[in-house]
Image (spheres, rainbow, N blue to C red):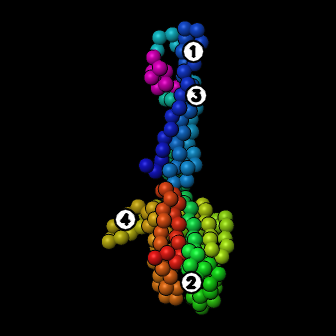
Amino acid sequence: ADIVFQLTYTVNESGPKNSVTFNLQAIDAYTSKQIAGAQGTSEPSFSADIPTLLEEAVIGNMDNFSNSLQSYFDDLFENGREVTLIIKVWNNSEVNLETEYFNRGNNDQLDVLIEDWVSENTVKGRYSVSSTSKNQKIFEQVRIPLFYERNARQRAMDTRTFINNLRKYLKEDPFMIDSKIYQKGLGEAWLIIGGS
């Protein structure tokens, strides 16, 4: 599931009356971030059962929750899905992220050329780099398109498909770099340079 809904509740007893306090969260499975939430407490009752009290409490607080979900979907369509990409280099690799290549009329480090590719292939060039070294580069808040075209049909883009396109790019001239993909959950993928 792209979105996980989590509902927790507590039964409150006050003499012969019961009420229910609930917490409803919608969590993006790609980022583990909460994208919508609602909390509330039902009216105390002498006779209503717990499921009825819970239903009343949740229904009474759904407007803001639904609006938050709709805002999330609007943001996805406008700015793409948020994922994390990690580029790593095997210890025995002949190249690392400081290796220089001549590409598009410039001589640049592989690190820079990979970042150029990410910038060109993300929605509105949106991403951030949280860490970079000779053997590792971490891209966070990478906004990938929701869809891509294959065999004249649109398909849903996921983290693995997106980073596989980078793998193919690095396998071409002038790089000719072998690499492997390792996926960690829905929203994180590693490209391991030198892994074959």
| Number of other residues with Cα within 10 Å of mark 4, as a class: few under 14, some 14 to 19, many 20 or more | few
| Number of other residues with Cα within 10 Å of mark 1, as a class: few under 14, some 14 to 19, many 20 or more | few
Residue mark closest to the camera, 3 vs 2:
2
Distance Cα–Cα, label 4 vs label 1:
53 Å
Distance Cα–Cα, label 2 vs label 4:
38 Å
The numbered disc on residue 13 is 1
Q: Which residues are magenta?
A: 49-57
Please give the residue where the numbered disc 2 appears in the rendered image: 94
Q: Earlier in the sequence, mark 1 or mark 2?
A: 1
> Which element carries disc 1, helix, strand or loop?
strand
Q: Residue at x 43, y 49 (%)?
A: 1
**In the visual, does 166 lie left or right of 99?**
left
> Which element carries disc 2, helix, strand or loop?
loop
Name the residue nearer the viewer: 69 or 140: 140
Distance Cα–Cα, label 3 vs label 1:
16 Å
Q: Earlier in the sequence, mark 3 or mark 4?
A: 3
Q: Which kind of residue does numbered mark 3 sit on?
A: Gly
Name the residue nearer the viewer: 160 or 103: 160
Q: Earlier in the sequence, mark 4 or mark 1?
A: 1
Q: Is residue 151 above or below residue 177?
A: above
Q: Earlier in the sequence, mark 3 or mark 1?
A: 1
Name the residue nearer the viewer: 83 or 37: 83
Q: Earlier in the sequence, mark 2 or mark 4?
A: 2
The numbered disc on residue 40 is 3
| Number of other residues with Cα within 10 Å of mark 3, as a class: few under 14, some 14 to 19, many 20 or more | some
Distance Cα–Cα, label 1 vs label 2:
68 Å
Residue 106: x and y, percent? 62, 89
Any magenta on residue 83? no
Q: Residue at x 49, y 25 (%)?
A: 54
